[in-house]
Amino acid sequence: MVLPAHIGLWRQGVYNEAMYRVVREITFCYGHRLLNHSGKCRHLHGHNGRAVIVLESCQLDHLGMVVDFGAVKKVIGAWIDTALDHRMILHKDDPLIPLLQQQGEPIHVLDVNPTAENLARLIYDFAAEQCFPVVEVCLWETEDSCATYRGEAQDRGER
Ligand SMILES: [Zn+2]
């Protein structure tokens, strides 16, 4: 049987409208400061962050799910708990790192400035590494400020 052309395109991922989407939020607390920032973000401060993890698939599993919400919490939530929650997240060149390490303070060191954008990407990359069909992660740094990272188009194909 020859499929209509638009079905073939949909199957190739050219059309993305026929997709299921699930969203799971994970909240955590973190501290950071931004190197080379001219404003008050250059000082140590903290946030009650909210990561909004968006997962999509054009097919459901045998239970009728894109992904079990519980699996997102168990895998991504557990990693956030261990790696980021109640930690000072700092750029690798931050001169405070040795001092905080000496004091036994929990830190998480990044190659890039710990902005909301880079934290969104950090969580996205972890979710993708764990084979979740993640399409974007939004990191709400405050109640009114959010940064989003979307993976590259080829990452968002059928999984
Ligand atoms: Zn901040």
Image: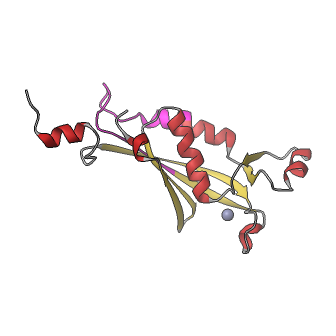
In the figure, is residue 9 to the left or right of 36? left
Please state the horizontal and vertical placement of residue 28, each as a whole percent of the image. 62, 50
Locate residue 130 relative to residue 5 in the image: left or right: right
Of residue 73 and residue 37, the one placed in the foreground of this image is: 37
61 falls in the magenta region: yes
Q: Residue at x 92, y 45 (%)?
A: 102
What residue is at 66 percent from the left and 53 percent from the top? 29
User: From the image, which quarter does the C terminus lie in?
Assistant: top left
Q: Position of residue 90 (x, y in %)?
A: 75, 53
Q: Quadrant of residue 34?
A: bottom right
Q: What is the magenta range?
A: 52-75
- For the N terminus, which image quadrant? top left
Question: In the image, 63: left or right of 100?
Answer: left
Q: Is 100 located above or below residue 34 in the figure?
A: above
Residue in front for this viewpoint, 63 or 21: 21
Can you give x and y, in whole percent of width and height, for residue 111 in the image? 71, 49
| Residue at 64% across, 59% down | 115
**Is residue 123 positioned above or below 113 on the image?**
above
| Residue 95 in the image: above or below residue 64 | below
